[in-house]
Image (cartoon, helix red, strand yellow):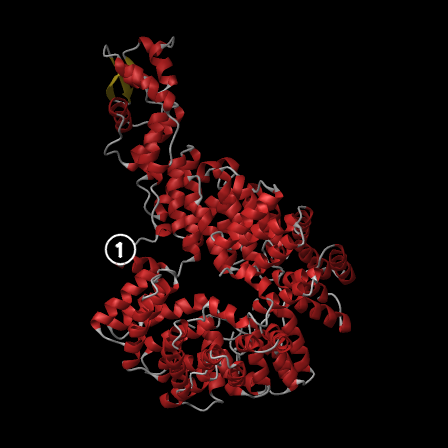
């Protein structure tokens, strides 16, 4: 949600009296179609069971090192000292690590670093195209930046011709010598019936073969006329060559003649001519058709500039160009020599990109397998090989090519990728060796520090109490894994233990909005004939992914109407009442469902899509939120409304100043609530001037004077209260929060609690947060905040609840670890942080653990965590200083 957060300094003062601040401050840094008959009978236990299916978790085609912290630290260390040409590959490896962790923002940052640190044109092409592919739905951002006079650099074109240089020094020197001699005589080349008069010395200067022919001991050196009819060059082509020998230019030469000259230049080793021809042809490539036709010549004639230009066009058209069999064939059948011509030393990066795009299109396709085969061939380092082996193994497994899959998984495992044992275990199970698969996983678990996925995988090969114990252990080690929750919930549902089943699936939906979990809960509600709740979930699913197909592909988007038949129709007024109720109770999924339903009415869609984007941000779905913002812009009913949505799009993608400019443009057209709110928000974020808060207050007051609904006015009051608190105006802040609560802005309880605390009334603050906990459907953050207003034992109890509700929140781990350190239990403190770090790459957790290691004298471990933390945020100033200090100790 777009809101103002309490300042860190205030948070520190609140906790100082009761929390182990000496440690916490270390890192703080100041239905095919579901039929009606099937649907109507789903309340019976047998029908419900047919819907309640939990598929096995897939073997993911990702790099998943056992100790990702160690790998990130090694990458960071190598980046500090490696030559420039190796940096892009290291950032690509870093990207693969973050991809295995599911850290989308960090993945993109690594890709951008790879692009920025590219040392060749080919690397720039590949990583630029990869960034464009990752942001393929964000082209609008580039257009919006252009309206503000700013360029999105990574989307810009690359001038291949000027940036790809050739080494022609020897030839140019020879030409200079020839040019110095003015006593020239002509030679005539006959091609068919035509004769072309040429400057003998100029032609001789084109290459060593021509020089030997015209000035050496060959008979042609004595001839005035030389027959060139058998050399596959036309008279027009040779006239252009003759002109080039004098002028050094290929002006107004048609593409077909250029191709003739290119072949001729290769045959007679005319490097300058070939390079000029190569570049001229490269400048003419403007479409996929051009690129397909010319790439074949480029590869045959070793024309790297032309090949790079064709590659640029192919990559620019990803993913659609991979639907062209001719393009796929070019990439699939390129041997090592052709790959060098086409992409230089960036072959591995190219096929990483192509294989990812192909897997997203169809992981079982022939082109996916072919691209991954080329990836294996291109791999040079150990990490590149294990990734390529594992990814191709996953595709072979999907294609049921089991023998080849086994060979690849074994190769990846032998190269050090322990996660590939999951592929081997699946193959063993498929072949009927269930006990072997169980024992193979058990061997891994007993030999290293186990991770959650290992127990999840082993649970597939056992039954009864052993299976449940493994699934519980998997959740304990990695609570982000969805399969254990789904399996336990489905088992409870089959045993008619309805409430426990819903509670189990709600555990993960409370902090991770996984579509497969929503689908399972939808099935539960169908089985219970709770159609209103079922409709809520299916509409939330379709909001997040409009093309999502349920029941293993059998549920069509349009068949949502089958559920609607069992639910009463809401009027527009009903919908607004429901939205108000659910928004006020912090029921984000329920609010999403209501908005989905309202979008099917005649209500203005721009504002509804905007509200949808706010909810999706609150649910940590930034990509879906951006799609909703773009739809809001598309459906804006006025120019000033459109400018507001454009401002939020720019702000949410890191372009704060440009977002502020859009808000100002909107206000000039119409003084609206949303325009003032956007300007206040952007100004508060971008202004470093303390006096800027006066302007923010004024803007929020202006916003509150404009027409709007209570949902948004409550947010503005809450934000205004936060500004007042930051400047010690507690009475004004309290009034804002109380007024927000009067219109049921439930989150204002948190701000009012802060006011109570700053007035030294901790009991009132605790009570205020208790009210929020009672009202909010999603209340993990409320428990965390309440822990700041009570004694240590109550705080520990609240933070245990937080970890149970949302294990991704890092503060509880830091608090418990700091308590351990205060009690001189260093091992327990480090273990507490390590259990969270195992599944969440968090800067603050790594920073605090590094401080603990430094405290106990383990400099190497502290340095490792420093380097891993800097991989997460390379510009974190306190972490950089920490790293410098620890590194000096290590040296």
Within 10 angstroms of label 1, few (less than 14), some, or many (20 or more) residues?
few
Q: Is residue 807 left or right of residue 714?
A: right
Residue positioned most to the bottom: 568
- Residue 848 rendering spot, x and y as whole percentages: 59, 59
* Position of the C terminus by quadrant: top right
Q: Residue at x 41, y 35 (%)?
A: 304
* Nearest to the observer: residue 641 or residue 174: 641
- Residue 577 rendering spot, x and y as whole percentages: 40, 89
Q: Residue at x 43, y 39 (%)?
A: 120
Q: Is residue 239 left or right of residue 722?
A: left
Residue linked to disc 1:
149
Residue positioned most to the left: 669
Give the quarter of the image for residue 503: bottom right
Q: Residue at x 31, y 82 (%)?
A: 708
Count of numbered circles on the image: 1
* Nearest to the observer: residue 888 or residue 163: 888
- Residue 647 rendering spot, x and y as whole percentages: 32, 66
């Amino acid at each position: 949600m777009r809101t103002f957060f309490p300042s860190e300094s205030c948070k520190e003062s609140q906790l100082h009296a009761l929390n182990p601040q000496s440690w916490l401050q270390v890192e703080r840094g100041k239905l095919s179609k579901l039929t009606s008959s099937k649907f109507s009978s789903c309340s019976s236990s047998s029908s419900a069971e047919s819907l309640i299916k939990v598929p096995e978790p897939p073997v993911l085609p990702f790099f998943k090192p056992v100790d990702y912290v160690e790998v990130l630290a090694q990458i960071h260390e190598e980046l500090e000292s490696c030559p420039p040409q190796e940096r892009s590959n290291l950032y690509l490896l870093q990207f693969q690590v973050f991809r295995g962790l599911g850290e989308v923002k960090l993945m993109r940052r690594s890709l951008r670093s790879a692009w920025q640190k590219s040392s060749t044109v080919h690397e720039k092409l590949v990583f630029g195209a990869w960034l464009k592919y990752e942001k393929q739905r964000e082209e609008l951002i580039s257009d919006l930046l252009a309206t503000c006079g700013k360029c999105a650099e990574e989307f810009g074109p690359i001038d291949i011709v000027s940036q790809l240089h050739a080494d022609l020094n020897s030839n140019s020197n020879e030409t200079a010598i020839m040019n110095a001699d003015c006593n020239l005589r002509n030679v005539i080349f006959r091609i068919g019936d035509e004769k072309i008069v040429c400057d003998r010395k100029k032609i001789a200067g084109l290459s060593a073969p021509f020089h030997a022919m015209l000035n050496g001991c060959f008979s042609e050196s004595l001839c005035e006329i030389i027959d060139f009819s058998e050399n596959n060059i036309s008279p027009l082509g040779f006239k252009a060559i003759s002109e080039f020998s004098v002028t050094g230019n290929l002006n107004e030469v048609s593409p077909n003649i250029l191709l003739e000259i290119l072949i001729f230049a290769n045959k007679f080793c005319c490097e300058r001519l070939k390079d000029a021809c190569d570049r001229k042809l490269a400048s003419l490539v403007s479409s996929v058709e051009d690129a397909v036709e010319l790439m074949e010549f480029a590869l045959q004639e070793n024309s790297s500039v032309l090949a790079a230009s064709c590659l640029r066009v192919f990559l620019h058209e990803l993913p659609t160009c991979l639907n062209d069999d001719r393009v796929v064939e070019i990439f699939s059948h390129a041997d090592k020599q052709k790959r060098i011509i086409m992409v230089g030393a960036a072959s591995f990066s190219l096929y990483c990109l192509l294989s990812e795009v192909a897997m997203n299109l169809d992981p079982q396709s022939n082109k996916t397998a072919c691209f991954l085969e080329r990836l294996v061939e291109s791999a040079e380092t150990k990490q590149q090989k294990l990734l390529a082996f594992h990814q191709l193994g996953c595709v072979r497994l999907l294609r049921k090519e089991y023998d080849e899959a086994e060979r690849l998984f074994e190769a990846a495992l032998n190269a050090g990728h322990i996660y590939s044992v999951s592929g081997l275990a699946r193959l063993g199970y498929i072949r009927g060796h269930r006990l072997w698969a169980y024992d193979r996983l058990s061997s891994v678990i007993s030999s290293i520090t186990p991770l959650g996925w290992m127990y999840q995988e082993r649970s597939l090969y056992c039954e009864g109490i052993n299976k449940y114990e493994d699934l519980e252990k998997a959740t304990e080690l990695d609570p982000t894994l969805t399969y254990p929750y789904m399996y336990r919930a489905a088992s409870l549902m089959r045993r008619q233990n309805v409430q426990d089943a819903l509670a189990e699936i709600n555990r993960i939906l409370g902090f991770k909005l996984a579509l497969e979990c929503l689908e399972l809960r939808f099935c539960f509600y169908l089985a219970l004939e709770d159609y209103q709740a079922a409709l809520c979930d299916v509409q939330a699913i379709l909001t997040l992914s409009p093309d999502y197909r349920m029941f293993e592909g059998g549920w069509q988007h349009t068949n949502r109407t089958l559920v609607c038949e069992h639910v009463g129709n809401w009027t527009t007024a009903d919908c607004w009442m429901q939205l108000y109720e659910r928004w006020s109770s912090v029921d984000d999924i329920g609010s999403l469902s209501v908005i989905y339903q309202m979008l099917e009415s005649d209500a203005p869609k721009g504002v509804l899509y905007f509200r949808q984007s706010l909810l999706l941000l609150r649910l940590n779905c930034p990509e879906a939120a951006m799609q909703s913002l773009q739809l809001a812009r598309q459906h804006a009913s006025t120019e000033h409304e459109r400018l507001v949505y454009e401002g939020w799009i720019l702000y949410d993608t890191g372009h704060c100043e440009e977002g502020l400019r859009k808000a100002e443009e909107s206000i000039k057209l119409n003084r609206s609530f949303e325009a003032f709110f956007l300007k206040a928000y952007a100004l508060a974020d971008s202004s470093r001037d303390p006096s800027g808060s006066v302007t923010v207050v004024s803007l929020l007051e202006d916003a509150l004077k404009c027409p709007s609904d209570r949902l948004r006015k409550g947010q503005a009051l809450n934000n205004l209260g936060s500004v007042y608190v930051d400047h010690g105006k507690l009475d004004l802040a309290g009034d804002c929060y109380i007024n927000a609560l009067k219109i049921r802005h439930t989150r204002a309880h948190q701000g009012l609690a802060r006011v109570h605390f700053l007035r030294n009334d901790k009991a009132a603050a605790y009570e205020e947060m208790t009210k929020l906990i009672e009202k909010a459907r999603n209340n993990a953050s409320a428990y965390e905040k309440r822990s700041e207003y009570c004694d240590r034992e109550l705080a520990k109890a609240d933070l245990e609840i937080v970890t149970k509700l949302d294990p991704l929140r890092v503060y509880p781990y830091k608090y418990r670890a700091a308590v351990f350190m205060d009690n001189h239990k260093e091992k327990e403190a480090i273990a507490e942080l390590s259990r969270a770090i195992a599944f969440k790459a968090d800067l603050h957790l790594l920073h605090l653990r590094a401080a603990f290691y430094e405290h106990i004298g383990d400099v190497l471990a502290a340095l490792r965590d420093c380097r891993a933390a800097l991989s997460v945020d390379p510009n974190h100033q306190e972490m950089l200083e920490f790293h410098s200090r620890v590194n000096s100790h290590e040296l």
